Amino acid sequence: GKGEYDHYMEKEIHSQPTALSNTIEGRIEDGTVAFDDLEAGAFADVDSVQFVACGTSYHAAMYGGQLLRTAGIPAEVLRASEYDTAAGPVDENTLVVAVTQSGETADTLDAVRTAAGRGARTLAVTNVVGSTAAREADDAIYIRAGPEVGVAATKTYSSQAVTLALLTQRLADDVPDATPADDREAMLNALADLPRHVETVLETSRARALAREFMDSESYFFIGNGFGHSVALEGALKFKEITYEHAEGFASGQLKHGPLALVTSASPIFAVYTGGDDEKTKTNAIEAQSRGAPIVAVGPDDHPLVDVADAHLWVPETHPVWAGLLANVQLQLLSYYAAKLLDRPIDKPRNLAKSVTVE
Ligand code: M6R
């Protein structure tokens, strides 16, 4: 049941410290990563990766794609429904990774079957043991987030992104010519602190007050680059899904290529940054601010955006990979409180189902 919480979504947001601890548990030893039956060398034949996913899982897959490319491993991130025409060629050295909470999304299963038919090796990254994706793919890795009841995916995004970051470490060690990150130790050490940092965000968040402050806005925009791009897209998806308000997410640099025409004083911009390479987010946020839009900086202290923003959703200082996940927790809370103020049926938004089993 929901216990002390008003909605499953609220409960699931608050269960992220535990979910993340479970995701990580037992998978890191002496600075390397192993998954049960996928031990060292399991991916020695892989030379490139394609992620296929939908919705929130697609946003988590963007994390995986960026991390793999940084490690020198060619990686595409594809919307599963577009796999047929969007995917590059595959062979037996291509690992096609289906990222799917339910393991039952028809678009994603179809992409996996197409990829397998073209000769690729397949891997399911899923939350549901024994799901169709887990059974059909050559291998499966479980994100271990625990059951998710709310239609809006929350804790599973966090656990997917962490699982994919761990998978990147395994691939970087296995794939010939890959270059493991030189800050891996710092990154894995910071990962151990992630559950505690999520707890801190949950305890200190000002998202409820901001949801109220911006309640009468016309549109809600979310921007970010790098990992922040994934979080911006995810923030906007969650916001529209449960509030029914107009929300859009963009890569920071894309705002000026059209969407800026929609920017007014009634369109707050949530600028997500991670402390990595976020220069574009700052310059484009300032551009929107000069058109009257209120800017909310979403990320750690000690960033030039904080000084110019009209408000700040703060997250603790950490490695840039994890800062995005903390920023996302702030945006989950923002969506949740905005939907609550609007009295929406948060756990079951209209027209949507938890798993989408039609194409
Ligand atoms: O079960 P899956 O991860 O394959 O589901 C994919 C999407 O349908 C899902 O993430 C959807 O976008 C969520 N309702 C978003 O909150």
Image (tube, rainbow, N blue to C red):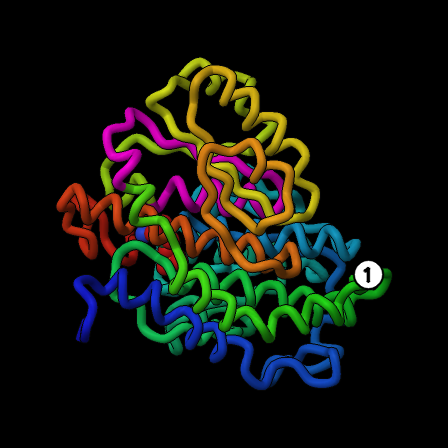
Give me the residue at 40% from left, 59% from top. 204
Dividing the picture into quadrants, the one containing residue 46 is: bottom right
Tell me: 246 left or right of 70.
left
Give me the residue at 66% from left, 50% from top. 66
Residue 215 belongs to magenta span: yes
Determine the secondary structure under disc 1: loop
Instruction: State the image coordinates of residue 315 (x, y, percent, origin top left).
Output: 52, 55
Instruction: State the image coordinates of residue 14 (x, y, percent, origin top left).
Output: 34, 67
Dividing the picture into quadrants, the one containing residue 47 is: bottom right
In the depicted view, which residue is nearer to us: 194 or 38? 194
Figure check: 110 above or below 82: below
Q: Give the labeled residue for mark 1.
A: 178
Figure check: 350 above or below 182: above
> Is disc 1's CB within 8 Å of ligand 1?
no
**Ligand 1, image quadrant it occupies:** bottom left
Numbered marks: total: 1
Give me the residue at 79% from left, 54% from top. 72
What's the magenta region? 212-238
Q: Indicate the quadrant containing the N terminus: top left, top right, bottom left or bottom right.
A: bottom left
Dividing the picture into quadrants, the one containing residue 109 is: bottom left
Give me the residue at 55% from left, 18% from top. 257
Instruction: State the image coordinates of residue 108 (x, y, percent, origin top left).
Output: 43, 54
Badge 1 crowding class, 10 Å Cα cut-off, few under 14, some 14 to 19, many 20 or more, is some
Q: Amino acid at mark 1?
A: Ala
Instruction: State the image coordinates of residue 90 (x, y, percent, origin top left).
Output: 66, 51
